[in-house]
Amino acid sequence: MTAAVVAIIAVVVVLVLLVSASVRVAREYERGVVFRLGRLLTPPKGPGLFFLIPLIDKMVRVDLRTVTLNVPPQEVITKDNVPVRVNAVAYFRIIEPTAAIVQVENYMVATSQISQTTLRSVLGQHQLDELLSERDKINTILQQIIDEATSPWGVKVSIVEVKDVEIPAGMQRAMARQAEAERERRAKVIAAEGEFQASERLKDAANVMSENPITLQLRFLQTMLEMSSERSTTMVLPLPIELFRPFLERAVEPGSGRG
């Protein structure tokens, strides 16, 4: 009787072990890639509860969530021969679990390596000014190239962002001097445009006054009013403008300066 009980207990234990070894549960963001005696079974298992044949089926779990991949700093020579140190971050996820396991040995390492080489290659084709001012354009180019390279592995690269661009100290000082010179140039251009516009307005005012003499007299009276409002010991004697008109007309006559 004792031997029969022991045998029954042993059978129950074996059955429990077989059941525990055959039952698998995959979360909503997981898939199970199953190999039966080395042969791939499709489609992938999950999510939820499923069964495997103990000692015959082998399963590899694949996470479908988005992965944040930090691309290590890379030494890059830009198109205008400026050495910079650049790092980036890439966001990708698995869209084909079977391809991610079968087509590449380690999709994480492979994606990291292709991101590093693409980063050096793409940035080496752009000048430093483009790298600093056209970041969105470069990010788009990086994303398209890396996504195309990893597509056979079942990897979808959604975002690639260049994070930091380290520039040599000497180049930073040169850029600061260039920016200062550019600001000075803009200030001079704005001042010159202001003087040009002021001269245009003065010319228009002179044309109006020449067509209407009373305007010049009103301007003369206004100037006297402004001078009298200030604390000054200067004495101003107003004289009619008509007294000076013959002299002015003679000054502008052709040949008046000849002897």
Image (cartoon, rainbow, N blue to C red):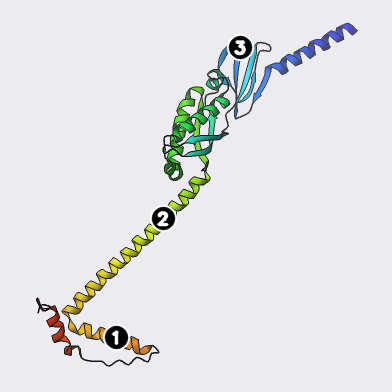
Question: Residue 119, percent across and down?
Answer: 49, 33
Residue depicted at x 50% and y 29%: 117
> In this rendering, is residue 221 above or below 175?
below
Amino acid at dot 1: Gln
Q: Nearer the viewer, residue 55 or 174?
A: 174
Q: Please state if 26 lies on the left or on the right of 82 as rendered.
A: right
Residue depicted at x 79% and y 10%: 11
Dot 3 falls on a residue whose secondary structure is strand
Question: How far apart, in angstroms, are the residues tagged by discs 1 and 2?
Answer: 43 Å
Q: Which mark is residue 222?
A: 1
The residue indicated by pointer 3 is: 36
Question: Residue 1, percent across and down?
Answer: 90, 6
> In this rendering, is residue 177 above or below 113?
below
Circle 1 crowding by C-alpha within 10 Å: few under 14, some 14–19, many from 20: few
Quarter where residue 254 is shown: bottom left
Mark 1 vs mark 2: in front: 2
Q: Which mark is residue 181?
A: 2
Question: Residue 110, percent across and down?
Answer: 54, 25
Q: Going from the N terminus, do you reach mark 1 or mark 2 first?
A: 2
Mark 2 vs mark 3: in front: 2
Q: Which mark is residue 208?
A: none
Amino acid at dot 3: Arg
Q: Please state if 189 lies on the left or on the right of 134 as rendered.
A: left
Dot 2 falls on a residue whose secondary structure is helix
Q: Going from the N terminus, do you reach mark 2 or mark 3 first?
A: 3
Circle 3 crowding by C-alpha within 10 Å: few under 14, some 14–19, many from 20: some
Quarter where residue 189 is shown: bottom left
Mark 3 and mark 2 in contact (Cβ < 8 Å)?
no
Look at the image and tell me in which quarter the C terminus lies. bottom left
Q: Please state if 68 lies on the left or on the right of 225 as rendered.
A: right
Mark 1 vs mark 3: in front: 1
